[in-house]
Image (cartoon, rainbow, N blue to C red):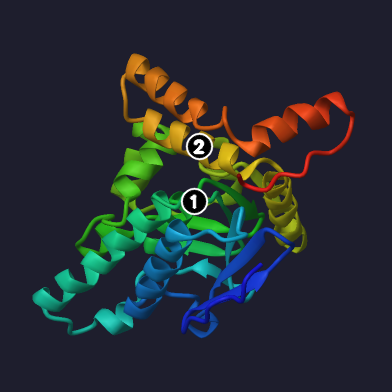
Amino acid sequence: MEPLPTFETLALDGAGEHVLLARLNRPGVSNALDTQMARDLVRFFEDVALDPGGIRCIVLTGAGEKAFCAGGDLKERRGMTDEAWGRQHVIFERMVRAMLDCPVPIVGAVNGAAYGGGCEIAAACDFLYAAETARFALTEVTLGIMPGAGGTQTLPRAMGERRAKELILTGRVFTAADAAAWGLVNAVLPAGDLLAAALATAETIARNAPISVRQAKQSIGRGQGMALRDALAFEIEAYNRMVPTEDRHEGVAAFNEKRKPVFKGR
């Protein structure tokens, strides 16, 4: 893997040949989302989209044991003018789009509180593992605002419209077990096992053909917003991208030769 960039509010570590571990890194304030963190997330995910290099899967978690991300930094927002608030929120909007548009799979490892914008960052991952102690909430309506970083769209898609309405309109806190039962979280684990499980899944993804993984992710994501027949047509266009690749030839050859394939992303 190429040398990793440095960010003020993100800590990046290689976690295997093709897996990158990214930590939201403001542990002193429960990894609260401020303007700089949003800018760092935009730059990180857009840079990965432009050139993934050797990165085939990303695990996103929070620094420390207390929180994944406690939401927007309200101390930074205190006294903020309406104009400044709007300018900041444009960055938050761009952040979510950068995550959703990232071609490399993002596995969220929710190690603690994921409230407000933190819950929205989690929901923008491709799927989530959570510690037993993790808690989730979209509390924006209790503050005179509403979810504006994708929450009113990502939560209904994960858990259904009626459940999402209940949680968003009440601002109620819900547990990792609730999140799993309702479809937001894939697995709930003891806190000490969370990161290892997320990294193991990321390693499994990274061993697969990277073009295949990226095309499948795109087909699933975009297909959700299409009528079925349009989505099927999109799927075939994504599928056809693989037919002439070296990796497709390698995968079939390895199967027939009873060996593990060596995929190169070509």
Which is nearer the eye, 32 or 140? 32
Residue 72 in view here: yes
Picture coordinates of residue 32, whole percent (x, y): 43, 75
Picture coordinates of residue 53, whole percent (x, y): 57, 61
From the image, which quarter does the C terminus lie in? top right
| Residue pictured at 89% horizontal, 29% vertical | 258
**Amino acid type, label 1:** Cys
Name the residue beneath numbered marker 1: 125
Picture coordinates of residue 4, whole percent (x, y): 58, 75
Left or right, residue 105 beside residue 77:
right
**Amino acid type, label 2:** Gln
From the image, which quarter does the N terminus lie in? bottom right
User: Whole-Å distance between the Cαs marked 2 and 1?
Assistant: 16 Å
| Residue pictured at 67% horizontal, 55% vertical | 132
Which labelled disc corresponds to residue 195? none
* Residue at the farthest right position: 258
- Circle 1 packing at 10 Å, graded few (<14), some (14-19), many (20+), is many
Mark 1 element type: loop
Name the residue beneath numbered marker 2: 215
Comes first in the chain, label 2 or label 1: 1
* Residue at the farthest top position: 229
Q: Is residue 192 above or below residue 170?
A: below
Mark 2 element type: helix
